[in-house]
Amino acid sequence: MRAVRITLWGGVGVALAGFLWLSLWHDRGPSGGSSSQDVATSFRPTFNLTDHRSNAVTVQSYQGKWLLVFFGFTNCPDICPTTLAELARVMERLGPDAGLVKPLFVSIDPERDRVETMAEYVSVFHPTIVGLTGTEAQIAEAARSRQAVLAGPAVHELEAKSLLQKHRETYRTFWAWADNNKDIGLLGLKLETCFGWTIQVEAGEVKANTFLNWPMQAHGAEMIRIACILAVERGINLCAPIHDALLIEAPIDQIDAEVARLKACMSEASEAVLGGGKACRVDANIVRYPGRFMDEDGQAMWDQIMGLLAETEG
């Protein structure tokens, strides 16, 4: 019997990935026995968009389905593909109930995410995922429809700004570095790390958050690259890098020793990038075959979907 363990970096930085969120919505329609007003709604969408097959769609196009709605963009380096991969696993686990759910991936970068781009992108993850795009005005309308009804535990915009300000005050050195990167990028339309990672944009495509987020993503990618090299050189059975994590496999009687060796690789890699004797904390989670790893967010999403399906069937 073998065990798989996934080792994660903690506290690498703040992801300024922009507008990413996941919500569920359901409208059983006039023939479904109850209206959408009877359902505890976290998101009542309104949209007029184009799917990845060039069809014009509205929320009525998916009447009778639970909508699993995710806003992102195809050039997102990690959070979007990781979340869509998690969605794909959820759809697989639903089995025959998957027909009751429709995952929607709505682009927030319609200028780049044209229909053909969305079609190629979503096809990588799961055949049930629908890619939606449109004009900037149409995307904004869809986003506003979500904001208009969001309630409960959601973070209010003012609270979010307050949290960000507190983060700036607490981590002044980090923000001085991040703001300097942004200024350099906006002036020269190009940034390059000491490891050779480069980003360059056209004058008409400049977004300040790109230059805030990219250096963190580039340095994180360099940590993962170095850790992978060290792990392979030391004979660790490396399965795959996943966002800010490495997935390894080892016999159960050797897993603790292998995890300790991988932690050393990841610590060395982060110190090589950060310098000054600084290294990131490394955590680990274990999954025994045939179980599969699922983080807290993925488990919460799964539990929510199954609970809503149970209510519908009841």
Image (cartoon, rainbow, N blue to C red):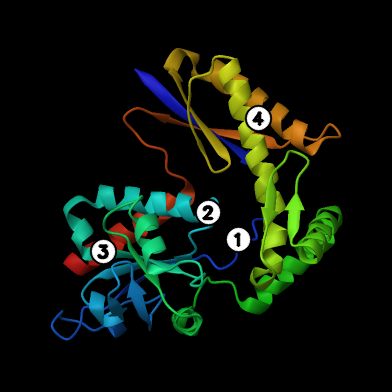
Residue 101's mark? Answer: 3
In terms of image quadrants, where is residue 193?
top right
Q: Residue type at mark 3?
A: Val
Q: Residue type at mark 1?
A: Ala
Residue 261's mark? Answer: none
Q: Residue type at mark 4?
A: Ile
Q: Nearer the viewer, mark 3 or mark 2?
A: 2
Q: Is residue 10 visible?
A: no
| Vertical arrangement, residue 44 with respect to residue 221, above or below | below
Residue density around tag 3, few if under 14, some if 14–19, many if 20 or more, within 10 Å? many
Residue at the (49%, 19%) spot, across then down = 255
- Residue on which the image places disc 2: 79
Task: Work out whether mark 2 precedes mark 4 in sequence or the reverse, and give the earlier one.
Answer: 2
Front one among 169 and 300: 169
Q: CA distance from mark 1 to mark 2?
A: 8 Å
Q: Are marks 3 and 2 in contact (CB under 8 Å)?
A: no
Residue density around tag 2, few if under 14, some if 14–19, many if 20 or more, within 10 Å? some
Residue at the (61%, 24%) spot, across then down = 229
Residue at the (60%, 35%) spot, across then down = 283
Residue 217 position in % (x across, y down)? 65, 49
**Circle 1 SS class:** loop
Q: Are marks 3 and 1 in contact (CB under 8 Å)?
A: no
Task: Work out whether mark 1 precedes mark 4 in sequence or the reverse, and give the earlier one.
Answer: 1
Task: Work out whether mark 3 precedes mark 2 in sequence or the reverse, and give the earlier one.
Answer: 2
Q: CA distance from mark 3 to mark 2?
A: 22 Å
In terms of image quadrants, where is residue 228?
top right
- Residue on which the image places disc 4: 226
- Residue on which the image places disc 1: 17
**Circle 3 SS class:** strand
Q: Are marks 1 and 4 in contact (CB under 8 Å)?
A: no
Residue 182 position in % (x across, y down)? 78, 62
Q: Is residue 219 visible?
A: yes
